[in-house]
């Protein structure tokens, strides 16, 4: 997660406007934070949460950094912070049962704001991650809360695809756009994946054994994503579940179910980034083969440059890009991911 100082420093003009609004007590009660990179929008949402929750910010326009609210938001243990994120294999946010809503649903999220504040914190904050993954029913159920949230509540919706949200949802939020031109790949094993793709394109054609080795490396990175998502989610929820277990075992059980559902969603996010990285690598090799300058590439740090310092073969680059697109399309269906990755690797290495 990007630090508070770094994320606010990237968008100084926008941040100054928000600070002024906070000082004048004119901060909106619902924001839609739009950015291509997940880390950017999530880090900015937490920075805005600190601005809203810090009591000193009402006087100075700047979070103090040392009060209860600032400290707890910084370390992820703020008791009045609610999260709602897509879960499950379909990676969606469901509306939930009207009478007895399930965890990780819009209605459960809304009901949580009516719980008694036991911490003494003045501000309740709700963050809906990847809000575009709500279907129309879920968004419509949220409209009244967006328009008239409970007193002292701030709602932050984050998305990389704002056009996928209903106009009625967007109109009830103040939209904050955080434009960035590149994607940062931080999933576990990203270095190994890019090394494998480099070997596939530049070396495996003349060394068939390298194609199999690269395929196995890609498969290993993909297979490790689920464990990485589970480990990170367990760590993130550990303190919260332990605190709940001390006074309400039933609540701890509910939180464990919520954690497990969030773990599935976290895995789907990592898998999406993994597949995006394959497509991005193939796209950059193709751009390079067409004579694009290094500084014009979206991710010039990727190892897309030929060992001999020349240009990639344009025909092979075009094929790799096509094979990557076909891989992403194939994996939308219920197919064996290991076989699909192996097929992609061998076709890329052998040229068809």
Image (tube, rainbow, N blue to C red):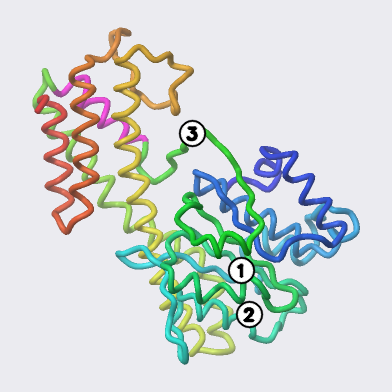
Q: Quadrant of residue 2?
A: top right
Magenta stretch contains residue 251: no
Compared with residue 336, is residue 301 higher up or lower down, i.e. above or below? above
Is disc 2 in contact with disc 1, using a CB cutoff of under 8 Å? yes
Which residue is situated farthest in the right direction here? 59
Which percent across, then down, holds residue 239?
56, 71
176 with respect to 222 (left or right): right
Q: Quadrant of residue 102?
A: bottom left
Mark 2–mark 3 Cα distance, whole angstroms, equals 36 Å
Query: Dot 3 corresponds to which residue?
Result: 182
The mark nearer the N terminus, 3 or 1, is 1
Badge 1 crowding class, 10 Å Cα cut-off, few under 14, some 14 to 19, many 20 or more, is many
What main secondary structure does the magenta stretch of the protein show?
A: helix
67 with respect to 310 (left or right): right
Query: Dot 2 corresponds to which residue?
Result: 113
Q: Quadrant of the C terminus?
A: top left
């Amino acid at each position: 997660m990007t630090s508070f100082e770094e994320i606010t420093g990237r968008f100084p003009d926008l941040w100054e406007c928000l600070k002024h609004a906070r000082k004048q007590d004119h901060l909106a009660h619902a924001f839609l934070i739009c950015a291509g990179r997940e880390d950017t929008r999530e880090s900015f949402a937490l920075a805005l949460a600190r601005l809203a929750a810090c009591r000193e910010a009402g006087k100075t326009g700047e979070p103090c950094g040392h009060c209860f609210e600032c400290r707890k938001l910084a370390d992820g243990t703020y008791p009045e912070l609610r999260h709602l994120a897509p879960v499950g294999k379909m990676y969606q946010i469901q509306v939930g049962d009207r009478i007895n809503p399930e965890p990780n649903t819009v209605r459960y999220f809304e009901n949580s704001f009516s719980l008694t504040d036991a911490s003494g914190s003045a501000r309740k904050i709700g963050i809906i991650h990847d809000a575009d993954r709500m279907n129309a029913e879920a968004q419509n159920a949220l409209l009244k809360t967006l328009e008239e949230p409970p007193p002292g509540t701030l709602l932050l919706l984050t998305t990389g695809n704002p056009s996928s949200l209903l106009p009625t949802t967007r109109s009830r939020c103040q939209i904050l756009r955080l434009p960035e031109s590149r994607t940062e790949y931080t999933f576990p094993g990203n270095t190994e994946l890019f090394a494998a793709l480099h070997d596939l394109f530049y070396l495996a054609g003349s060394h068939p054994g390298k194609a199999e080795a690269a395929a196995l490396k890609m498969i290993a990175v993909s297979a490790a994503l689920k464990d990485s998502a589970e480990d990170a989610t367990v760590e993130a929820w550990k303190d919260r579940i332990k605190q709940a277990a001390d006074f309400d075992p039933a609540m701890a059980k509910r939180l464990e179910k919520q954690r497990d559902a969030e773990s599935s969603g976290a895995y789907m996010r990592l898998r999406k980034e993994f597949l995006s990285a394959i497509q991005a690598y193939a796209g950059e090799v193709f751009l390079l083969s067409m004579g694009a300058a290094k500084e014009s590439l979206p991710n010039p740090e990727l190892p897309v440059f030929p060992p001999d310092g020349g240009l990639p073969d344009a025909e092979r680059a075009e094929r790799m890009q096509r094979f990557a697109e076909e891989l992403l399309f194939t994996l939308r269906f219920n197919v064996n991911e290991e076989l699909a990755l192996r097929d992609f690797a061998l076709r890329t290495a052998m040229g068809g």
